[in-house]
Image (cartoon, rainbow, N blue to C red):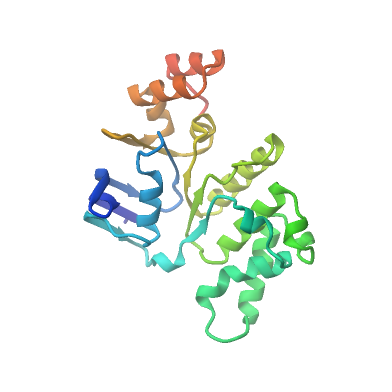
Amino acid sequence: MALITIDNASMGYDGKTVLSNLSLNIYEKDYVCIVGENGSGKTTLMKCLLGLIQPIKGVISFGDGLKQSEIGYLPQQTLIQKDFPASVSEVVISGCLNKKHTMFYSKQQKETAARNMELTGVYKLRKKCFRELSGGQRQRVMLARSLCATQKLLILDEPVTGLDPMATADMYTLIKNLNSKGITIIMVSHDVNSAVSNASKILHLSRNNYFYGTAHQYLHSDLGKKFILSDCPCDDCRHRAKAGAHNV
Protein backbone atom coordinates (compact mmCIF):
# COMPACT_ATOMS: atom_id res chain seq x y z
CA MET A 1 0.00 0.00 0.00
CA ALA A 2 1.25 3.45 -0.88
CA LEU A 3 2.16 5.90 1.87
CA ILE A 4 0.75 8.74 -0.28
CA THR A 5 -1.61 8.40 -3.23
CA ILE A 6 -2.35 11.39 -5.46
CA ASP A 7 -5.22 10.58 -7.80
CA ASN A 8 -5.90 12.95 -10.72
CA ALA A 9 -5.45 15.97 -8.46
CA SER A 10 -5.44 19.58 -9.62
CA MET A 11 -4.14 22.22 -7.20
CA GLY A 12 -4.03 25.97 -6.98
CA TYR A 13 -5.33 29.07 -5.20
CA ASP A 14 -8.62 30.97 -5.33
CA GLY A 15 -9.91 28.69 -8.06
CA LYS A 16 -6.86 29.27 -10.27
CA THR A 17 -5.19 25.99 -11.20
CA VAL A 18 -1.42 25.83 -10.89
CA LEU A 19 -0.92 22.07 -11.22
CA SER A 20 -3.26 19.84 -13.24
CA ASN A 21 -4.19 16.16 -13.25
CA LEU A 22 -1.33 14.83 -11.12
CA SER A 23 -1.39 11.12 -10.31
CA LEU A 24 1.35 9.22 -8.48
CA ASN A 25 2.15 6.95 -5.56
CA ILE A 26 4.88 7.47 -2.97
CA TYR A 27 5.86 4.39 -0.99
CA GLU A 28 7.52 3.81 2.34
CA LYS A 29 11.30 4.48 2.18
CA ASP A 30 11.06 6.40 -1.12
CA TYR A 31 13.34 9.40 -1.53
CA VAL A 32 11.52 11.74 -3.90
CA CYS A 33 13.02 14.99 -5.20
CA ILE A 34 10.61 17.54 -6.67
CA VAL A 35 12.22 19.73 -9.31
CA GLY A 36 10.97 22.11 -11.98
CA GLU A 37 10.76 25.66 -13.14
CA ASN A 38 9.57 28.48 -10.89
CA GLY A 39 5.79 28.66 -10.88
CA SER A 40 5.36 25.01 -11.85
CA GLY A 41 3.55 24.09 -8.61
CA LYS A 42 6.23 22.74 -6.27
CA THR A 43 5.17 24.89 -3.31
CA THR A 44 1.48 24.33 -4.08
CA LEU A 45 1.97 20.56 -3.98
CA MET A 46 3.85 20.79 -0.67
CA LYS A 47 1.03 22.82 0.87
CA CYS A 48 -1.52 20.24 -0.26
CA LEU A 49 0.53 17.39 1.21
CA LEU A 50 0.75 19.27 4.51
CA GLY A 51 -2.99 19.99 4.52
CA LEU A 52 -2.55 23.77 4.34
CA ILE A 53 -4.70 23.93 1.20
CA GLN A 54 -7.04 21.42 -0.42
CA PRO A 55 -6.92 20.13 -4.02
CA ILE A 56 -9.27 21.87 -6.43
CA LYS A 57 -10.21 18.43 -7.68
CA GLY A 58 -9.01 14.88 -7.23
CA VAL A 59 -7.82 13.16 -4.07
CA ILE A 60 -4.71 13.02 -1.90
CA SER A 61 -4.86 10.07 0.51
CA PHE A 62 -2.50 8.60 3.08
CA GLY A 63 -1.79 4.98 3.93
CA ASP A 64 -0.02 3.02 6.67
CA GLY A 65 -1.81 5.03 9.36
CA LEU A 66 -0.04 8.26 8.38
CA LYS A 67 -1.77 11.50 9.45
CA GLN A 68 -0.94 14.93 8.05
CA SER A 69 -0.23 16.12 11.59
CA GLU A 70 2.49 13.47 11.80
CA ILE A 71 4.49 14.72 8.81
CA GLY A 72 7.82 16.33 9.66
CA TYR A 73 8.37 19.57 7.75
CA LEU A 74 11.61 21.51 7.27
CA PRO A 75 10.92 24.92 5.66
CA GLN A 76 13.47 27.12 3.98
CA GLN A 77 15.72 29.08 6.31
CA THR A 78 14.43 32.53 7.26
CA LEU A 79 15.87 35.47 9.17
CA ILE A 80 13.36 34.82 11.96
CA GLN A 81 14.63 31.25 12.36
CA LYS A 82 18.22 32.46 12.58
CA ASP A 83 17.34 34.72 15.52
CA PHE A 84 15.54 32.20 17.73
CA PRO A 85 16.39 33.29 21.33
CA ALA A 86 16.38 29.70 22.57
CA SER A 87 18.77 26.86 23.22
CA VAL A 88 19.26 24.06 20.73
CA SER A 89 17.41 21.59 22.95
CA GLU A 90 14.47 23.98 23.32
CA VAL A 91 14.22 24.45 19.57
CA VAL A 92 14.38 20.72 18.89
CA ILE A 93 11.82 19.63 21.50
CA SER A 94 9.37 22.26 20.23
CA GLY A 95 8.85 19.88 17.32
CA CYS A 96 6.81 17.76 19.76
CA LEU A 97 4.25 20.53 20.29
CA ASN A 98 1.54 18.82 18.25
CA LYS A 99 1.85 15.82 20.59
CA LYS A 100 1.86 17.87 23.78
CA HIS A 101 -1.25 17.55 25.98
CA THR A 102 -0.01 19.32 29.13
CA MET A 103 2.09 22.35 30.05
CA PHE A 104 5.15 20.11 30.29
CA TYR A 105 7.02 17.84 27.92
CA SER A 106 6.86 14.17 28.82
CA LYS A 107 9.86 11.97 29.53
CA GLN A 108 9.24 10.20 26.22
CA GLN A 109 9.23 13.50 24.31
CA LYS A 110 12.49 14.56 25.96
CA GLU A 111 14.01 11.21 25.00
CA THR A 112 12.74 11.64 21.43
CA ALA A 113 14.35 15.09 21.20
CA ALA A 114 17.64 13.77 22.59
CA ARG A 115 17.61 10.85 20.15
CA ASN A 116 17.00 13.14 17.18
CA MET A 117 19.77 15.49 18.28
CA GLU A 118 22.11 12.48 18.37
CA LEU A 119 20.85 11.37 14.96
CA THR A 120 21.56 14.75 13.37
CA GLY A 121 24.87 15.33 15.16
CA VAL A 122 23.85 18.31 17.30
CA TYR A 123 23.54 16.72 20.75
CA LYS A 124 26.82 18.26 21.91
CA LEU A 125 25.39 21.67 21.00
CA ARG A 126 22.16 21.18 22.97
CA LYS A 127 22.92 23.91 25.54
CA LYS A 128 24.13 26.50 23.02
CA CYS A 129 21.95 29.38 21.84
CA PHE A 130 20.46 28.66 18.43
CA ARG A 131 21.39 32.09 17.07
CA GLU A 132 25.10 31.42 17.76
CA LEU A 133 25.26 28.44 15.42
CA SER A 134 26.57 28.30 11.86
CA GLY A 135 24.13 27.90 8.97
CA GLY A 136 24.84 24.19 8.64
CA GLN A 137 24.41 23.62 12.38
CA ARG A 138 21.11 25.51 12.39
CA GLN A 139 19.74 23.37 9.58
CA ARG A 140 20.74 20.22 11.45
CA VAL A 141 18.92 21.51 14.52
CA MET A 142 15.81 22.30 12.47
CA LEU A 143 15.99 18.86 10.88
CA ALA A 144 16.13 17.30 14.37
CA ARG A 145 13.09 19.42 15.27
CA SER A 146 11.14 18.19 12.25
CA LEU A 147 12.00 14.58 13.14
CA CYS A 148 10.29 15.07 16.50
CA ALA A 149 6.99 15.31 14.61
CA THR A 150 7.31 12.08 12.64
CA GLN A 151 8.54 8.53 12.42
CA LYS A 152 7.57 8.06 8.78
CA LEU A 153 7.76 11.08 6.47
CA LEU A 154 9.83 14.25 6.09
CA ILE A 155 9.02 17.06 3.66
CA LEU A 156 12.05 19.29 3.05
CA ASP A 157 11.86 22.63 1.25
CA GLU A 158 15.23 23.58 -0.25
CA PRO A 159 17.14 22.35 2.83
CA VAL A 160 20.59 23.40 1.57
CA THR A 161 19.75 26.96 0.47
CA GLY A 162 22.38 29.36 1.79
CA LEU A 163 24.76 26.66 2.98
CA ASP A 164 28.43 26.49 1.98
CA PRO A 165 29.57 23.52 -0.14
CA MET A 166 30.82 21.46 2.83
CA ALA A 167 27.64 22.02 4.86
CA THR A 168 25.60 21.22 1.75
CA ALA A 169 27.39 17.90 1.24
CA ASP A 170 26.95 17.06 4.94
CA MET A 171 23.23 17.83 4.79
CA TYR A 172 22.71 15.64 1.71
CA THR A 173 24.58 12.79 3.43
CA LEU A 174 22.47 13.17 6.57
CA ILE A 175 19.22 13.16 4.60
CA LYS A 176 20.28 10.04 2.73
CA ASN A 177 21.19 8.34 6.03
CA LEU A 178 17.75 9.16 7.44
CA ASN A 179 16.18 7.62 4.35
CA SER A 180 18.29 4.48 4.79
CA LYS A 181 16.87 4.19 8.34
CA GLY A 182 13.34 4.01 6.95
CA ILE A 183 12.22 7.67 6.81
CA THR A 184 10.42 8.53 3.57
CA ILE A 185 11.81 11.76 2.09
CA ILE A 186 10.08 14.31 -0.13
CA MET A 187 12.43 17.17 -0.96
CA VAL A 188 11.92 20.25 -3.12
CA SER A 189 15.18 21.21 -4.77
CA HIS A 190 16.57 23.46 -7.50
CA ASP A 191 19.78 21.40 -7.53
CA VAL A 192 18.74 18.86 -10.14
CA ASN A 193 22.19 17.28 -10.43
CA SER A 194 22.34 16.51 -6.71
CA ALA A 195 18.73 15.34 -6.90
CA VAL A 196 19.48 12.64 -9.46
CA SER A 197 22.59 11.64 -7.48
CA ASN A 198 20.76 11.20 -4.18
CA ALA A 199 17.07 10.54 -4.76
CA SER A 200 15.43 7.26 -5.75
CA LYS A 201 12.65 9.04 -7.65
CA ILE A 202 12.24 12.39 -9.41
CA LEU A 203 9.03 14.37 -9.78
CA HIS A 204 9.60 17.08 -12.38
CA LEU A 205 6.74 19.56 -12.54
CA SER A 206 6.24 21.64 -15.65
CA ARG A 207 3.54 24.08 -16.67
CA ASN A 208 2.35 21.71 -19.37
CA ASN A 209 3.15 18.24 -18.07
CA TYR A 210 5.12 16.32 -15.47
CA PHE A 211 7.53 13.41 -15.15
CA TYR A 212 7.54 10.90 -12.29
CA GLY A 213 9.91 7.95 -12.20
CA THR A 214 13.29 6.74 -11.05
CA ALA A 215 16.34 8.99 -11.23
CA HIS A 216 17.72 6.69 -13.93
CA GLN A 217 14.53 7.00 -16.00
CA TYR A 218 14.58 10.77 -15.54
CA LEU A 219 18.09 11.04 -16.97
CA HIS A 220 16.91 9.15 -20.06
CA SER A 221 13.77 11.26 -20.48
CA ASP A 222 13.53 14.20 -22.86
CA LEU A 223 12.41 16.47 -20.01
CA GLY A 224 15.29 15.39 -17.79
CA LYS A 225 17.93 15.85 -20.47
CA LYS A 226 16.60 19.28 -21.37
CA PHE A 227 16.39 20.47 -17.78
CA ILE A 228 19.86 19.23 -16.79
CA LEU A 229 21.40 20.93 -19.80
CA SER A 230 19.67 24.23 -19.04
CA ASP A 231 20.32 23.98 -15.29
CA CYS A 232 24.05 23.41 -15.52
CA PRO A 233 25.94 24.12 -18.77
CA CYS A 234 29.27 22.58 -17.66
CA ASP A 235 30.84 19.94 -19.90
CA ASP A 236 30.36 17.14 -17.34
CA CYS A 237 26.61 17.72 -17.02
CA ARG A 238 26.20 18.08 -20.77
CA HIS A 239 27.97 14.77 -21.28
CA ARG A 240 25.82 12.98 -18.68
CA ALA A 241 22.58 14.38 -20.06
CA LYS A 242 23.44 13.53 -23.67
CA ALA A 243 24.58 10.06 -22.71
CA GLY A 244 21.62 9.50 -20.39
CA ALA A 245 23.92 7.83 -17.92
CA HIS A 246 24.63 8.53 -14.27
CA ASN A 247 25.82 6.61 -11.26
CA VAL A 248 22.41 6.11 -9.61
Number of disc labels: 0
Residue 60 vs 148, above or below: the answer is: above
Pinpoint residue 248: horizontal percent, then vertical percent: 50, 30
Can residue 3 be seen here? The reply is no
> Image check: 53 left or right of 228?
left
- Quarter occupied by residue 37: top left
Pinpoint residue 150: horizontal percent, then vertical percent: 51, 64
Name the residue rendered at 65%, 80% in the picture.
Answer: 107
Pinpoint residue 24: horizontal percent, then vertical percent: 29, 46
- Quarter occupied by residue 21: top left
Can residue 61 be seen here? The reply is yes
- Quarter occupied by residue 146: bottom right
Pinpoint residue 98: horizontal percent, then vertical percent: 50, 74
> Image check: 175 left or right of 59?
right
> Image check: 153 left or right of 163?
left
Quadrant location of the N terminus? bottom left
Name the residue rendered at 76%, 64% in the picture.
Answer: 126
Name the residue rendered at 39%, 67% in the picture.
Answer: 67
